[in-house]
Image: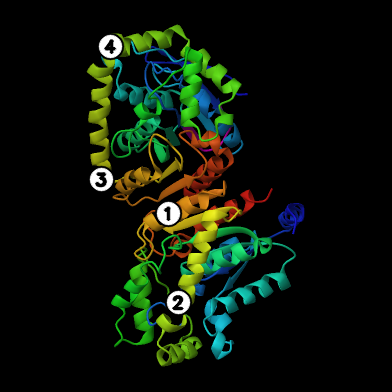
Amino acid sequence: MSQQIYQDRLTAAALRDRQPVVVLAGGLPGHPAYPTSAPLWSEARRLLEDKIELHVIESADVWKEAEDADFMKLSVFSSYLSGFIGSRFDGPVHLVGEDVAASYMAAFALAEPRLTASCTFISSSLALPGNGLLDHLLLDADDDKPASERVNGCLASLCRTGTLPLPAWQGPDDSYGRFNRLLVAEGGYEVRFWPEFRLRQEEALVRLAHWGMQRPCLVVAGSDDPLCPSAHSFALHRLLSQRERHAELVLFGHCGHFPQAEHPRRFADLFARFVESTLV
Amino acid sequence: MFAEKWTEIDGIRTRYFDEGDGHPIVFVHGGQYGGSGGSSASIWLDTAADLAGEFRVVAPDRLGQGFTDNPPRLEDYTIDASVAHTVALIRALGIGRCHLAGHSRGGFVVTQIAIDHPDLVSGITLVSSGTLSPGFARNHIVHANANAVSVRAGIRQGYERYFFNKALVTADRMAETTRLAGLPKIAEASAVMFDRAASSRYFVPSLQHGRVRLLRHLKRHGLACPAQLVWGLNDPTADPENGKILWDLFSAGKAHLELVVLNESGHFVYVEQREAFVRHLSGFVAGYLAGAF
């Protein structure tokens, strides 16, 4: 697609009542301590609904219908996302990737720039190869506890807001039965997920370093995030800034791993203003 | 274009700009007495103009800088006198509780006011303040090996080193800065600072003692009001990571904190990333006024 057509589509998008945004929720399907985070977007979505048409995609929902051979493969996720955007929207959408899903988002945006209006990275350790500090989550997981209690304890350890987490954040336990079964049967994340994830992440880093995202980028994180220390966000912002003038970093103080849920009103306003600023 | 206004603050004839309606934002520029860079409120005017539709925007020339009179006595060439002058101006203009935005050395001024006069301050924005971030600001490196052949060329060279995008060091900007730097009162302040040693006897000690006092307070108590730090990724005087270390000191308080880093901007981030700076500042102020955090 030529730059002019891309620009026309972006302008057309700007004229719509509500901007299309697709959020790729973080979390790890079937993970014993951190299985999901789509419900953490509920409040931000409610606050943004006048300005933004916000869709939250959870990787569990993508993969749960997949054939066994495709189960937990990022390539399946990218295909799904292409179809999702192509079938619903006339032009590019604003992408938001949270946590590990920010890495999916980057890989997708680099491969599909025509579908990408901007990229927002939430609590992402993309710039540091590997999987950040996610392994540390397992250290806190108490396998003897019921799943709901275990997940609640994990989410609580990631928040810096006393009234959180909310019960609704856990999601329905039975949604993840297949993930748990397959993960246990096939060696868990180390066999199914991380090898491809790390490969795609390395590819994304190389492409970002050489060509950049060439789309406006926003990096948001919490100052007290035990999974994604602020140094990770500084590194990501510097990487994105090498090739893209419109690259912004915002850290929230007194905030853990979930800025969109821990400071939802501030996040919603910040994000809406960022999206508006990309519309030229 | 905003009109210049004048008032007298404790015998000091003071220039300021004051436009718009709404919650007041007071912009405090950087630099110091006798500085050859011609620091003044004028540097904030584009930012203030962008915000005047939503806020009351006030931008004074600090004591002994821009067109504001120099301090009357040698021993008044201190950072504390600059703080006191700014507080007196806020009271004299009846501004009331306001948001303070301070750049570089102006970051010291606004943070000190927020600590000493919490009744006057609803929140602060600190912009690229190597004065407050750890270690020494690298101004001396920025200006090292200066080889300009005239005052005008020297000012331009300094600004080009401060800016990421040299094209923004425009002829208009340099004309205003050169005009200010050429004022007899600036030459007089420079003579007091360096020939009569007000700098080494009063200004630098006041800044060093004040800085330790201020940072110690932040580490123990944080700040009672919301605080936002905005930094240029390419600031040659202090890295954004240094800003982060400063920002961490604020976290002893319970008020909301934000750190914003913007790409392709040097020391004057509000000039080089004008739209983004205004967007983040107005969003932050509007956010806490609405109780968003």
**Residue B104, quarter of picture:** top left
Compared to residue A125, the image places residue A250 above or below, namely above
Q: Secondary structure at mark 4?
A: helix
Q: Which residue is mark 3?
A: B219
Chain bearing tag 1 is A
Instruction: State the residue at coordinates (28%, 43%).
Output: B218
Whether marks 2 and 4 lie on the same chain: no
Q: Residue B74: which disc?
A: 4
Q: Nearer the viewer, mark 1 or mark 2?
A: 2
In the rendered image, which quarter contains the N terminus of chain B?
A: top right
Chain hosting mark 2: A
The CA span between labels 1 and 4 is: 46 Å
Residue A279, position as x, y percentages in the image? 67, 51
Tell me, yes or no, if residue B291 can be seen here. Answer: no
The answer to whether residue A271 is above or below residue B89 is below
Question: What span is colored magenta in the figure?
Answer: B19-26
Which residue is painted at 57% across and 46% down in the image? A245
| Residue B129 in the image, given as x and y percentages of width and height | 38, 35
Residue located beneath label 2 in the image:
A195
Q: Nearer the viewer, mark 2 or mark 4?
A: 2
Q: Earlier in the sequence, mark 3 or mark 4?
A: 4
Instruction: Give the Cα separation between the discs numbered 2 and 3.
Output: 43 Å
Q: Is residue B231 visible?
A: yes
Amino acid type at image mark 2: Pro
Instruction: Please state which of residues A198 and A141 is positioned toward the viewer in this rendering.
Output: A198
Instruction: Identify which residue is drawn at 54% across, 54% down.
Output: A210
Asked if the residues shown at circle 3 and circle 4 are in contact, with their CB atoms under 8 angstroms apart, the answer is no
Looking at numbered disc 1 in the image, what kind of residue is underneath it? Ala
